[in-house]
Image (cartoon, grey):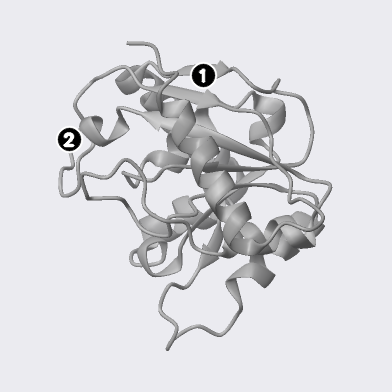
């Protein structure tokens, strides 16, 4: 019964997301093939991973788990149901003093089980005027531990205007999600260089978004 309810809720959420944002998925640097991947994107809204998950073809969506904040998604029973049962999210505790499991280990375990991931390497929602905050180190560690997995940049455009922080009623606007060419860690590439290259690859997609 719970699994059926989760499937129904997932269908309802994706339908609602499509009605409100009419999302356009542009696969400009990679094809939507059934390969294990880490999709990493800019982060301006709590709905970011919902929209990215929505535009994936069903064969990819069913194998893809968002990485999300534990303290947010377990705050109420409804959020916990959506986070755990509907999205099967990898829940990361962002509070170091409360944390009992290593975030990179949790993400690595999900990859080892065959899942793809949706990750926001900025770590927090970007509420500044800068297009993209500096990346935290999780993406580098995943790249180092999983050299065969594609790291796919995805630029999400316009969603921050649909659902600004603090608002509960979305404003209908068209959103675009641009999927770029996959990245991998170079054999001798240092952490800072890789994070800078990944950051540049993602922000470069912003310039390709159609008006």
Q: Quadrant of residue 168?
A: top left
Foreground residue, 65 or 182?
Answer: 182
Foreground residue, 114 or 7?
Answer: 114
Rendered residue at 36%/63% (across/down): 72
Residue that mark 2 sits on:
169
Helix, strand or loop under label 1: strand
Rendered residue at 71%/20% (across/down): 31
Rendered residue at 20%/47% (across/down): 165
Helix, strand or loop under label 2: loop
Q: Is residue 47 left or right of residue 64?
A: left
Residue 5 seen anywhere in this rendered image of the structure:
yes
Q: In which quadrant is the C terminus drawn?
A: top left
- Expressed as whole percent of the image width and height from the top left, the position of residue 209 reads 41, 18
Q: Which of the two marks, 2 or 1, is nearer to us in this view? A: 1
- Expressed as whole percent of the image width and height from the top left, the position of residue 26 reads 54, 17
Residue 1 seen anywhere in this rendered image of the structure:
no
Considering every residue shown, the one lying at the far top of the view is 211
Whole-angstrom CA distance, mark 2 to mark 1, is 23 Å
């Amino acid at each position: 019964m719970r699994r059926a309810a989760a499937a129904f809720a997932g269908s309802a959420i994706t339908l609602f997301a499509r009605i409100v944002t009419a999302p356009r998925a542009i696969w400009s640097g990679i094809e939507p093939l059934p390969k294990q991947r880490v999709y990493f994107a800019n982060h301006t809204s709590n709905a970011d991973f919902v929209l990215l998950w929505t535009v994936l073809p069903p064969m990819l969506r069913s194998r893809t788990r968002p990485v999300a904040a534990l303290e947010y998604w377990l705050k109420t029973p409804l959020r916990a149901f959506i986070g755990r049962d509907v999205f099967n999210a990898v829940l990361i505790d962002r509070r170091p003093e409360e944390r009992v499991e290593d975030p990179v280990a949790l993400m690595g375990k999900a990859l080892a089980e065959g899942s793809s991931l949706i990750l926001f390497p900025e770590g927090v929602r970007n509420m500044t005027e800068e297009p993209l905050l500096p990346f935290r180190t999780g993406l580098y560690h995943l790249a180092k531990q999983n050299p065969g997995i594609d790291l796919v940049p995805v630029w999400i455009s316009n969603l921050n205007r649909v659902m600004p922080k603090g608002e509960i009623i979305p404003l209908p606007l068209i959103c675009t999600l641009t999927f770029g060419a996959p990245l991998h860690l170079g054999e001798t590439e240092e952490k800072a260089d890789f994070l800078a290259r990944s950051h540049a690859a993602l922000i470069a997609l912003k310039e390709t978004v159609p008006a």
